[in-house]
Amino acid sequence: MEIISKSYCFLIISLMICNPLLCQSRAEVKSTQDVPVLYIDGNPYPPFAYMSYLGEEKYYRQIAATGIHLYCFPAYMGERGINAGSGIGPFRTHVWTGENQYDFSSIITDFEKIITADPKAKIIIRFYLDAPLWWEKINPDASTHLPDGSTFRQCFVSEKWRRETGKALEDCLDWLLSSPYSKYLIGIHVAAGGTEEWFYHARQRDDRNPVRTEEFRKWLTVKYNGDVMKLRKAWNDNQISFIDAEPGNINEGRNNRWRDPALERRLIDTYHFHSEVLEENIEYFCRTVKETSNRRLLTGAFYGYHFYVTDPGMGHGALAKLLECKDLDYLSSPNTYNRVIGEDWLPMLAIKSVQMHGKLWLAENDTRTSITTLLKEKAPDIAPPGQYESGVWLGPEDMKTSVAFLWKNAGRMLAYGYGGWWFDMWGGWFSHPELLNVIGKTLDLYNSYPQSDGGKMKPQVCVVYDEHLCFLDASNGSLTEQILSNRYPLGKTGTSYDLLLRPDLNKIPTDQYKAVWLLGLTDLSEDEMLLIKKLRESGTTVLLTDKGGTNIIRGNQDVFVKDKITWTDSQLRKIFENAGVHVYIKSGDVFYAGRSWLCIHTIAGGERTISLPFMARVINPVENTVLSEKTDELKVNFESKSTLLLRLEIL
């Protein structure tokens, strides 16, 4: 038996040496304590990472010293920049150099930089799948067709592009999984389109490739169950059929009005199709990663920016469909770009829906600081003149505000149960002891305090939004933005809220929320009307805001406020308080509450009174001090331009 045992052990060791897949980590997402959690090799893993487009070993070392060991770096199938409009150059040499030909040198360089700085590294590669120029030239039938007859990158509808790019991605994964770097690799972030975020490049919106029209007709056939009479009724056209229907003009002129679905269904259908094309591509490439890696690698993508990007031509109107994808583990977006002090930089989509569907949410914290560098300073050879050097690309003037910004990012992640990466775009944005301290301390707090759903701290306000609203907006999003601008006062009402997609409305518990805001929902269905009735009978206040104003439904009262679409934080706070919602703070500061965390971000400073709906022990976890052993009211003096994070132990 001893000889057999030794032989067996030798066989296992030999297989592990010969087959790196046996050493490959398994990364997955599981739901724990009411939110999805990252697991690596069966153990929970902190969902905080670092990424830079111009990764430098010295910055990797600084991040490793904070305790973070999760990294992202980009890789590119093609040799063109991520933003065709700005003209930015490529960040790396491209991988896919010819038919069945690959150059992995850039990937090797990035791995070597990271693992030299941090041997404990776990790495996600962001693979940009836009086609190389050589491929476009020999595949005009699978490329975007422009009005002048020329081609541009890939046609997103093309099965040929999807299939051949998928094969190239498989080949890259096969190489990675058989390489010495496989033990560090835990995931692939699939990316394409404008700024790697699955936006249509401007020139792809009105793709004249016949393949697009063919696929649109197939899509219509499925949508209308092959019933041409249904199609004709919907399109208000007695002559149309599935064999001659044409997509609407996505580039039509801007008009300051809402579309009439009874008369403009053709264009509305086109927008639905336009979005679902991108969603299906994300599904396809995530499935490729899962199947090639024997489901050991994590998959993620940028998509669904419906709560910030209101232009329907961008193609982000199919998040609800994507959330059903079994091969997608996480979603991400940057924080909204209203990057001023004293505002909530919320995610661009309904993260509660993301979490309800078992997907991890990872924020891209591309937070500008007082030491933020410009692309022209770090990589002048790829920086287009006059681009990436003003406005949102500039950080605050002082370190104090920079620290407050990072703590605000951290507080939101902790309070709402998600993670993210610190995106050091051009390098050096966080290379300061005070900023690195925030990054490291955020990780420490996540590890030091037990994960909890917060119990009595669960949000009492639910906001529900329709990602298809912008399809009805002939202004290309400006009318939709008027409704969505309520996202900013919501963050300053002094209470927390959940944000859901419309299809998830039927999943909300009728005993949790005291106020439900249906934001931008039109043409309510019978089921939705029935739910409103149930909420009303249970004592819940329902707000219904559409293009004509806002209905406030409470008990036997039904008050319509004509043309009232946008609200201030004080107006919303009053409505919420009347609904019985607990308001923690009434100062109009940015406020987050959840999962036993409170976070307050202020401009002016001064004394604030924080009211709790329960007795609690209150801790300042950053300074490791106890503010009160037992209280339901706390007075705190704030410095100006500051963020305070508190931990509550509910008694």
Image (cartoon, rainbow, N blue to C red):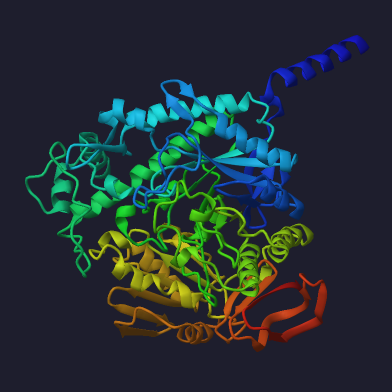
Q: Residue furthest left?
A: 239
Tell me where residue 244 sits by quadrant: top left
State which quadrant residue 225 falls in.
top left
Question: In the visual, does 236 lie left or right of 117?
Answer: left
Residue in the image at 54% along x and 67% along y: 395
Q: Position of residue 605 (x, y in %)?
A: 63, 86
Quarter of the figure with the N terminus? top right
Residue at the top extreme of this rendering? 3
Residue 423 seen in the current view:
yes
Q: Is residue 296 visible?
A: no
The residue depicted at 71 percent of the width and 28 percent of the height is 23
Left or right: 447 in relation to 470: right
Q: Position of residue 431 (x, y in %)?
A: 67, 58
Q: Nearer the viewer, residue 375 or 651?
A: 375
Measured from the top left, where is residue 221 in percent x and y? 23, 39
Q: Nearer the viewer, residue 287 or 408?
A: 408
Residue drawn where x is 51% and y is 24% of the image: 171
Q: Is residue 71 above or below residue 181?
A: below
Asked whether, in this view, residue 186 is left or right of residue 269, the answer is right
Up-down: is 436 above or below 243?
below
Name the outermost residue toward the right: 2
Q: Is residue 344 above or below residue 125?
A: below
Number of numbered tags placed on the structure image: 0
| Residue at the image position 20 percent from the left and 60 percent from the top | 261
